[in-house]
Amino acid sequence: MENNIILSIRNLKKSFDGVTVLDNINVDFIKGEVHAILGENGAGKSTLIKIISGYYKPDKGEIFIDGKQVTFKSPKDALNANIHTIYQELNICPHMTVAENIIINDSANYGKFIQRKSLYLNDAITVLKKLGQHDLDLNVNAGTLSVAKQQIIEIAKAILGNAKIIIMDEPTSSISQSDSESLKKLILSLKNEGITILYITHRLQEIYEIADRLTVLRDGNLIGTLVRDEFSDEKIIKMMVGREITNIYPKTVVEIGDVILEVKNLTSVDNRFRNISFKLRKGEILGISGLVGAGRSELLEAIFGLRKIKEGEIYYNNKKIFIKDPRYAISSGITFVTEDRKRTGLVPYFSVRENINLINSQYNNFLGVLKGNLLNKIAIKYQKRLNIKLRSLSQIITTLSGGNQQKVALAKWLEIEPKVILFDEPTRGIDIGAKAEIYKIMGELAAKGIGIIMVSSELPELLSVTDRVLVMRQGAIVAELESKNTSQEEIMKYATKLEN
């Protein structure tokens, strides 16, 4: 194996503000392997890949490529060493064409003003053909494409730059099941070309499908590396969280009550969904499944007043209501934990205390002056109740792990005692231990009689946590299934069946 090692990390250490985030990391990566890097949010994965990518300088330690020690002062140095990183938040220039995005790192090769258009178009065509992407229009703006297609652009950019190592950070977190399968096939083809893939994910199933080895980080420490024959859920989870999780999908048994929310023939102005009808009962967790673009998120937005309705009715406790905007939805007891917590769920530069009280601040002030003591008590209450792990309520929300940020995004609603909570992809981008805690919290809320609607792209999650599943396809509900009596295969059959 020694001769096949392309990247070595030795005694790597990194601290921020006196807090150690990586401590004495030693790991090797082999040419032509898919090497998964796992760990809970806050384990040090992002810091490690940013050091390898040249964004951070380590406090101590050494990096070797092909046996030669290297020092990266900037991301450009890593690119020059043929290391390319594809982050979860893609580095696409939306107003530039597909071809321009593909050649952007190598634009100097095509003239000062990129005048040799025919040359770079030919190079872009060549690299896309190599990736099996013959149908991608080189002249459209990259920002108009799906996330899956934008990922292809990032990979093409890396291939054109003669990448020897490609780092992929949660590449399937925002794309559909079918796009995920296509991406996995592409990754395996890159591996066969001798390219090393460092693959960060929270989805264990993906590890079994594509990884040759995996390395687990926990609390800034390297816990161990496993080869494929050693993979097992129990072993990996214990390495990640430091304890056994006997039930990854805890389901609270709740007595289902009367109908609390009913939707009749709901159609959006933009026709993203049509003639939607369903009922939600007290204490019920109702799942919504479907491919990306099926209209799931748009439906939740409409119920919360974020999207205009062309026709249809909404009933709350058997009374017809007219949700003109989110303020009216909130006053009716309906709240919404959005899919994108960084953009629409939290205020990035506010403290944890301020984020927990985003809603409460509207009600706990006197003539515009906030009641600081009361808001502090509320923050402490929900920090304890939801087991939010932090150093201080005053720390900036973005310094928390993804799972703890998600708890804060939920905590901000709980003091107003909602009766219906809409969750859009509640566990996206968070680790296994945090997921189990979120499911447990959802069960506790359901036990109090709160009705929950949950959109999720993770089918095992839907089947385990919900009571019923609505399947959407092309803006319509095409099936209503009992969670305990259906399967992933049946849900996918309904979700993917083409219209006649």
Image (tube, rainbow, N blue to C red):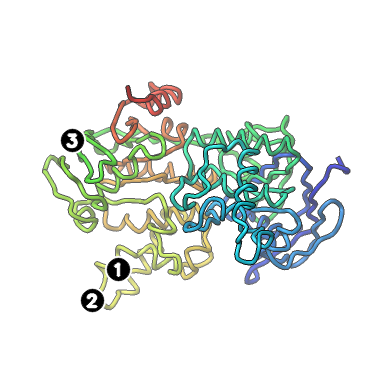
x, y percent for residue 413: 32, 56
- Asked if residue 39 can be seen in this view, the reply is no
| Circle 1/circle 3 CB separation < 8 Å | no
> In front: 107, or 307?
107
Disc 1 residue type (three-letter) = Ser
Q: In the rendered view, does 60 fall on the left or right side of 321?
A: right
Tell me the SS state at disc 2.
strand
* Mark 2 or mark 1: whose residue is earlier in sequence: 1
Of residues 500 and 314, the one drawn nearer to the viewer in this rendering: 500
Taking the image as shown, residue 102 lies to the left or right of residue 461, namely right
Q: Name the residue under label 3.
A: 265
Position of residue 191 measured from the top left corner of the image (x, y, whole percent): 71, 38
- Which part of the image, by quadrant, shows the N terminus? top right
Residue that appears at 76% across and 40% down: 194
Whole-Å distance between the Cαs marked 2 and 3? Answer: 43 Å
Toward the viewer: 358 or 188? 188
Q: Which of 372 and 214 is in front in this view?
A: 214
Give the class, few, some or many, for how many residues have Cα within 10 Å of label 3's Cα (few <14, many ≥20).
some
Q: Name the residue under label 1.
A: 361
Secondary-structure class at tag 1? helix
Q: Which residue is drawn at 43% across and 26% down?
A: 492
Mark 1 or 3, nearer chain start: 3
Q: Is mark 3 on a helix, strand or loop?
A: strand
Place residue 16 in its image quadrant: bottom right
**Is residue 425 in view from this perspective?**
yes
The amino acid beneath tag 2 is Phe
Mark 2–mark 1 Cα distance, whole angstroms, equals: 10 Å
16, above or below 232, in the image:
below
Question: What residue did someone put label 2 on?
Answer: 366
**382 sits left or right of 198 in the view:** left
